[in-house]
Image: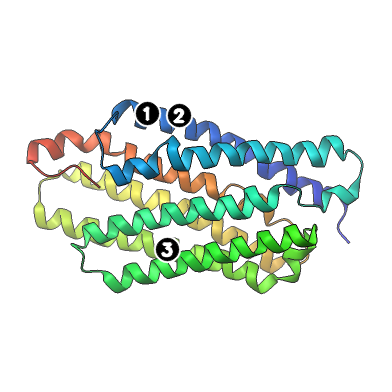
């Protein structure tokens, strides 16, 4: 039986960190919309990178996480039974989080497809498969949690929960390593970017993807070491925000290399 501190801490810290990352996302979205207004960007990128999809979902998710906090710590103040009830978190944490994560991972698969000149077919299929498995695992745990109206439903489906997080972790590792390989290959072949720009692109690509990978690993280790606790909810609460911030940071990074692209006559697309 978990103590009230063990129940309350992850349910409080997860949404609070989630709100902090939403503030970062607002800044990133402003920078993106200012530098890539109107039709100044690829339509597919704009569909994923703006308020109309990812930003809208993240806004809904942030609002619902506030409703979770109100339910757990205001309406349910002093009531330990409400701390084991998911309320809206089954939707904002698992379902919305899985939609955002899958969308961003598929975007990076799209980038890999372009960088590989449409040759890395099986690698892209493998990453897509892992991403879909992760999203389905998260979606299923959310539905079961809602039907059971208890966080304990997650713990009873430990294998499914681990599948969700492990598949997420593996897809991120593949994305980071593959992006690094193909970026290096493309720049070595074309030779129109300076070493400084190349290092900046590679470092940012690897670092942003490794952040989500690291949080996935932490979540996996927590649920493995503490299978009967809800500690894993804390890091998983911020995974969606990390993905959306990673996407916008990646898109905004093109601001610094756009002059190099334009002077080389290359298409400034992905």
> Residue 148 shows which numbered tag?
none
**Foreground tag (2 vs 3):** 2
Which residue is label 2 attached to? Answer: 27
Residue 171 picture quarter: bottom left
> Could one spot residue 146 in this view of the protein?
yes
Mark 3 is surrounded, within 10 Å at the Cα level, by few (under 14), some (14 to 19) or many (20 or more) other residues, namely some
Residue 190 picture location, percent across and down: 9, 53
**Left or right of 121, for residue 20:** right
**Is disc 1 in contact with disc 3, using a CB cutoff of under 8 Å?**
no
Nearer to us in this view, 105 or 221: 105
Crowdedness near tag 2: few (<14), some (14–19) or many (≥20) residues, C-alpha within 10 Å: few
Q: Secondary structure at mark 3?
A: helix
Element type at mark 1: helix
For the point 62% across and 40% down, the residue is 17
| Disc 1 + disc 2, Cβ < 8 Å | yes
Q: Residue 148, how many percent across, how many down?
A: 79, 62
Task: Tell me residue 170's x, y (percent).
Answer: 47, 67
Q: Position of residue 201 (x, y in %)?
A: 28, 46
Question: Residues under labels 1 and 3: Cα distance?
Answer: 28 Å
Which residue is at the front of the view, 57 or 221? 57
For marks 2 and 3, the one nearer the N-term is 2
Q: Check disc 1 and report the residue beneath it.
A: 31
Q: Residue furthest top?
A: 34
Badge 1: how crowded within 10 Å, few (<14), some, or many (20+)? some
Does the image show residue 226?
Answer: no
Residue carrying label 3 = 173
Is the residue under label 3 in contact with that under label 2 (CB below 8 Å)?
no
Query: Position of 83 compared to 93: left or right?
Result: right
Q: CA distance from mark 2 to mark 3?
A: 27 Å
Q: Nearer the viewer, residue 231 or 26?
A: 26
Helix, strand or loop at label 2? It is helix
């Amino acid at each position: 039986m978990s103590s009230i501190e063990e129940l309350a801490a992850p349910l409080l810290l997860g949404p609070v960190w989630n709100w902090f990352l939403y503030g970062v996302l607002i800044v990133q979205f402003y920078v993106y919309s200012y530098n890539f207004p109107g039709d100044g960007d690829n339509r597919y990128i704009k569909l994923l990178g703006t308020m109309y999809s990812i930003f809208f979902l993240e806004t809904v998710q942030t609002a619902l996480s506030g409703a979770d906090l109100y339910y757990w710590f205001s309406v349910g103040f002093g009531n330990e039974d409400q701390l084991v009830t998911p309320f809206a978190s089954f939707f904002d944490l698992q379902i919305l989080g899985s939609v955002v994560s899958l969308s961003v991972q598929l975007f990076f698969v799209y980038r890999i497809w372009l960088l590989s000149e449409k040759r890395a077919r099986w690698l892209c299929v493998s990453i897509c498969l892992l991403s879909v498995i992760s999203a389905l695992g998260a979606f299923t745990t959310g539905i079961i949690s809602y039907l059971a109206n208890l966080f304990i439903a997650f713990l009873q489906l430990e294998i499914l929960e681990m599948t969700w997080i492990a598949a997420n972790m593996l897809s991120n590792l593949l994305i980071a390593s593959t992006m690094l390989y193909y970026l290096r290959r493309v720049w070595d072949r074309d030779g129109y970017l300076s070493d400084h720009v190349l290092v900046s692109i590679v470092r940012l690509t690897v670092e942003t993807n490794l952040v989500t990978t690291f949080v996935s690993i932490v979540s996996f280790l927590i649920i493995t070491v503490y299978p009967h606790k809800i500690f894993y909810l804390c890091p998983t609460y911020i995974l969606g925000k990390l993905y959306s911030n990673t996407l916008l940071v990646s898109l905004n990074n093109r601001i610094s290399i756009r002059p190099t692209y334009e002077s080389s006559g290359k298409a400034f697309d992905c």
